[in-house]
Amino acid sequence: MKRILTIFMAITLFFSAMNFIEAEDFSNYKNSIRIKIASYSQDGYELKSSGGFNIIDSGNIIANTKRDAVKLFFNGSEMGIYDNGGLIGKYDFSREIVVSPVIGELNFKDNIYTGDFTITKLDGSLVNIVEMEDYVNSVVANEVGNTFEIEAIKAQAVAARTYAFYNGKKYIDKGYNLTGDAYSQIYNGKKRVDDKIRNAVAETKGEVITYNGGLIDATYSSSNGGIIASAKEVWGEERPYLISKLDPYSINTPKVNWSYSTSLKEIETKINPETKILGLESISIIRSDEGRVSFVVCKYPNEEKKIRAERFRSLMGNANIKSTNFTIEEALSINKPENKIVISKYGTIDLFAEEAPSTELVSTNNITINGKGTGHGVGMSQYGANEMAKQKFNYKDIIKFYYNGVEINKIYE
């Protein structure tokens, strides 16, 4: 029995240490996180601040200007900093130089930012080094906004913070942690941030979502249309906290229904980078047990190709195929002597003629794709979360509904 207890204690200590190390590793982002704001510009980046700027190297001010604007340029081996009086300095990338407002905040392209700015040595991208909670404020304001219920805003704050910690090393080799666009999370500095957002974020400060003691990839989308997608069916990766199930809170969310008209020829052209085949004859779908599309089956004269549904969305354009919760309808024609009546093979045939028309149906190659929801559908539905909040669920209830078997932990004060 003593041996069993010793082994049990050793295993417990191992996992406790592993979780502590992981928390320590990620918690350094609580002080600052690096967000790519803009890709390389040969015209440089103009930063504005009414109080002037400090040029800082390892915490030490090495230059400053009282002028209200500076420009940062990248020439491959150096960062040049200028104001309208001329060159302030040129700095190689053997050390990191940051630009910081003397007082207050900084303006870039009419957006206000806190923190410091620098340029990456790899490709000259503009990066904002910002405190984590300020970053979360911005993400929440730009992902859901202040019209959402307060508990839904809190749920978004915890999901956004967790996503940032989990994915914080995604672009580290490029000189930043995340991007400020939809490839990561939408970040626009202080734009749209107000007291309602700040208070909701503050009430969840330091809170993250964990599964079995580890941080989760807290993915989310606008609305799943009533069916949560699993990570496996969308990305081919099994994640026990990102499973598929029905979501009654996302069935009647705003702008839930969508439709896209296309043709077999257009589909053939757009999916060709994946299939490398011409002569598309028809397409059909394979659904998951819950009803979302898992694969699109493309039939050619001599073979079939299966494309994962999320990849099909990407090829066709995510703005066109807004989710993987869709149906496909092919337009057909009834052959008649005087004309052709275009119908859907899923609809009802209305026979207006006194003489019955021919029952021969001829494909017109016109395709209508009807769907529900927006986004990949994995994890939290933002509009579904808002509906849950309207029904008096708190943010922890919301999180535990959308992420299977998780806990909410505070990793810093």
Image (cartoon, grey):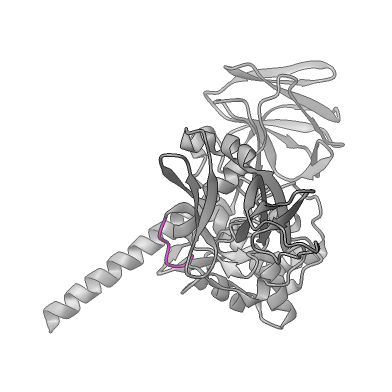
Give 271 or 131, whichever is nearer the viewer: 271
In this rendering, the count of numbered labels is: 0
Q: Position of residue 220 (x, y in %)?
A: 60, 60
Q: Is residue 142 above or below residue 155?
A: above
Q: Position of residue 216 (x, y in %)?
A: 48, 61
Magenta region: 237-242
- Snapshot quadrant of residue 123: top right
Q: Is residue 413 above or below residue 32?
A: below
Image quarter (top left, top right, bottom left or bottom right) of the C terminus: bottom right
Residue shown at 78%/50% (left/top)? 190
Q: Position of residue 38 (x, y in %)?
A: 69, 34
Image quarter (top left, top right, bottom left or bottom right) of the N terminus: bottom left
State the predominant SS element of the stretch in magenta: loop
Q: Does residue 101 appear to the left or right of 24 in the view shown?
A: right
Does 74 appear in magenta? no
Residue shown at 34%/63% (left/top)? 17
- Snapshot quadrant of residue 96: top right
Give 177 or 336, whichever is nearer the viewer: 336
Q: Is residue 267 visible?
A: yes
Q: Is residue 22 above or below residue 64?
A: below
Q: Position of residue 149 (x, y in %)?
A: 76, 72
Give 5 or 313, whichever is nearer the viewer: 313
Q: Does residue 378 appear to the left or right of 198 in the view shown?
A: left
Give 162 or 114, whichever is nearer the viewer: 162
